[in-house]
Image (tube, rainbow, N blue to C red):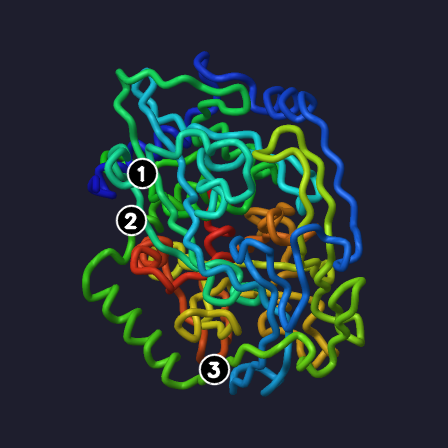
């Protein structure tokens, strides 16, 4: 694997390259590829899903893909000590992989235009490969996954990033994906299929701001670090501070101190989860139509019928999780001791592999709130003046499993020296420290990583 610091300069150069004659206009390409296929997505009753059956869980006839099961949760974290909920169980480790190549000296990323049935916009830029074993082993009987060989043992290219990371632990149980960036030599030509194109990070920056990059690509992009060892720079004061924050707190002592604090938090909180049958979930209604909470809270499990001529199979049906709308994830950041640092929290979620992970300052899901008493801490800082807002966009979650799950992404910078009082499970960390922690696996949750990608 390549030295991450040696690649940091290359990534920054690519991030500052916003136009290049070797690539198409990203807006036009996305629009044209979207128009080249036809799509139709309809909500249908669960009992009408072909090849899916409901017993004490929702399961595919092949036994592959994923199941929807019941979960009993007990914890001393947060206002509710015990509850039941459905959860998606998908033990397969999927590949989220992006191919990179140096073109005229600048790193370019091979991105695909991909339709996901749960996305509000349907079509977005995605990683080169986004597939579970059930998909790339063609359990669905459909078309093969392009470029897969570059990410498989024995035929893969040069690994730049390779991390096993968690996903949406409120909705998945112990879900993991392999996040990879693989480089191919600049003198190797590979056919670029019609739904794929090379883009620089600078071009992806704009697509991120527009909400045109899907969640599975964002979590890979969040693994990137930036540096200019000769002259730290960005496209403005805040972006320069972001680059500097990427290079801060990179000693072994910094990492050891942060890990010790996290272990203390894991010792402080407990999490006891038990898989149960769907019919055993108190407060939930399970029938042929959907799985839903009696109060309309949390989320629903619905059925979708999908037609998409650009996917591996043209038609299929599947269950989907549809959350109550209004999700929000936000960082509060501040220059402290000369470095831009981000206020993160140790957050317990029912599907976490190791009890808790680091999350953004605020991670809000309105469907989980019973009233004002359940509002998360530090919400008052999100009403900061517009001059303090450094990033704001609406981003989709995993459109392959979640239906219209759009989350507002927000970054607010407080003035240096402005006092802020946070609970004891909160801590200030630089982007460099967060990036180092994420290399070790289950330390930074996917919502925070998505927000880190938006700092591009």
Q: Secondary structure at mark 3?
A: strand
Please tell me which residue lies in front, 290 or 197.
290
324 sits left or right of 110 in the view: right
Q: Residue at x 57, y 63 (%)?
A: 88
Q: Nearer the viewer, residue 261 or 337?
A: 261
Percent x, y for residue 430? 36, 57
Q: CA distance from mark 2 to mark 1?
A: 10 Å
Q: How many marks are shown on the rendered structure? A: 3
Q: Nearer the viewer, mark 3 or mark 2?
A: 3
Q: Nearer the viewer, mark 2 or mark 1?
A: 2
Q: Return the residue at label 3.
A: 271
Whether tag 2 and tag 1 are in contact, CB under 8 A, the answer is yes
- Relative vertical location of residue 288 with respect to residue 318 in this rendering, above or below: below
Name the side, left or right, on which 156 lies relative to 58: left
The earlier-in-sequence mark between 2 and 1 is 1
- Report x, y in % for residue 260: 28, 75
Q: CA distance from mark 1 to mark 3?
A: 43 Å
Give the number of the disc on residue 448. none
- Nearer the observer, 304 or 116: 304
Q: Residues within 10 Å of mark 3 (few under 14, many from 20)?
A: some
The percent position of residue 312, horizontal first and vertical second, equals: 56, 34
Pointer 1: residues within 10 angstroms few (<14), some, or many (20+)? some
Does residue 20 appear left or right of residue 195 in this picture? left
Asked whether the beta carbons under mark 1 and mark 3 sit within 8 Å of each other, the answer is no
Observer able to see residue 122: yes
The residue beneath circle 2 is: 247
Residue wearing tag 1? 232
Labels 1 and 3: the sequence-earlier one: 1
């Amino acid at each position: 694997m390549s030295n991450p610091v040696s690649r940091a300069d290359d990534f920054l150069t690519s991030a500052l390259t916003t136009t290049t004659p070797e690539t198409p206009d990203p807006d036009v390409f996305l629009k044209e590829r979207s128009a080249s296929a036809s799509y139709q997505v309809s909500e249908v009753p669960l009992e009408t899903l072909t090849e899916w059956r409901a017993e004490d869980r929702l399961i595919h006839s092949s036994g592959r893909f994923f199941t929807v099961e019941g979960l009993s949760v007990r914890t001393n974290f947060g206002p509710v000590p015990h509850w039941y909920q459905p959860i998606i169980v998908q033990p397969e480790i999927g590949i989220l992989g992006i191919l990179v190549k140096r073109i005229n000296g600048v790193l370019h990323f091979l991105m695909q235009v991909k339709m996901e049935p749960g996305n509000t916009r349907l079509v977005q830029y995605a990683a080169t490969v986004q597939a579970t074993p059930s998909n790339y082993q063609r359990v669905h009987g459909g078309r093969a996954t392009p470029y897969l060989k570059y990410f498989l043992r024995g035929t893969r290219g040069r690994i730049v990033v390779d991390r096993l990371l968690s996903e949406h632990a409120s909705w998945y149980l112990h879900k993991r994906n392999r996040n990879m960036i693989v480089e191919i030599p600049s003198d190797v030509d590979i056919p670029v299929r019609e739904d794929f194109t090379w883009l620089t990070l600078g071009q992806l920056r704009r697509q991120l701001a527009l909400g045109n990059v899907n969640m599975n690509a964002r979590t890979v992009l969040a693994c990137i670090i930036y540096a200019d060892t000769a002259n730290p720079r960005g496209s403005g004061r805040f972006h320069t501070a972001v680059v500097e924050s990427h290079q801060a707190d990179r000693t072994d002592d910094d990492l050891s101190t942060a890990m010790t604090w996290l272990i203390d938090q894991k010792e402080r909180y407990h999490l006891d989860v038990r898989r149960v049958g769907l019919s055993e979930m108190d407060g939930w209604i399970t029938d042929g139509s959907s799985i839903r909470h009696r109060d309309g809270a949390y989320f629903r499990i619905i059925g979708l019928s999908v037609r998409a001529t650009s996917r591996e199979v043209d038609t299929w049906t599947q269950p989907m999780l549809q959350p109550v709308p209004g999700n929000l994830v936000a960082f509060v950041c501040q220059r402290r001791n000369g470095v831009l640092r981000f206020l993160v929290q140790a957050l317990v979620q029912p599907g976490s592999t190791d009890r808790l992970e680091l999350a953004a300052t605020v991670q809000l899901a309105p469907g989980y709130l019973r009233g004002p008493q359940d509002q998360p801490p530090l919400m008052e800082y999100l009403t900061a003046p517009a001059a303090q807002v450094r990033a704001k966009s609406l981003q989709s979650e995993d459109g392959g499993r979640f239906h219209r799950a759009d989350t507002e992404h927000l970054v607010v910078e407080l003035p240096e020296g402005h006092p802020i009082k946070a609970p004891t499970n909160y801590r200030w960390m630089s982007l460099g420290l967060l990036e180092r922690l994420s290399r070790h696996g289950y330390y930074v949750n996917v919502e925070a990583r998505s927000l880190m990608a938006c700092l591009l």
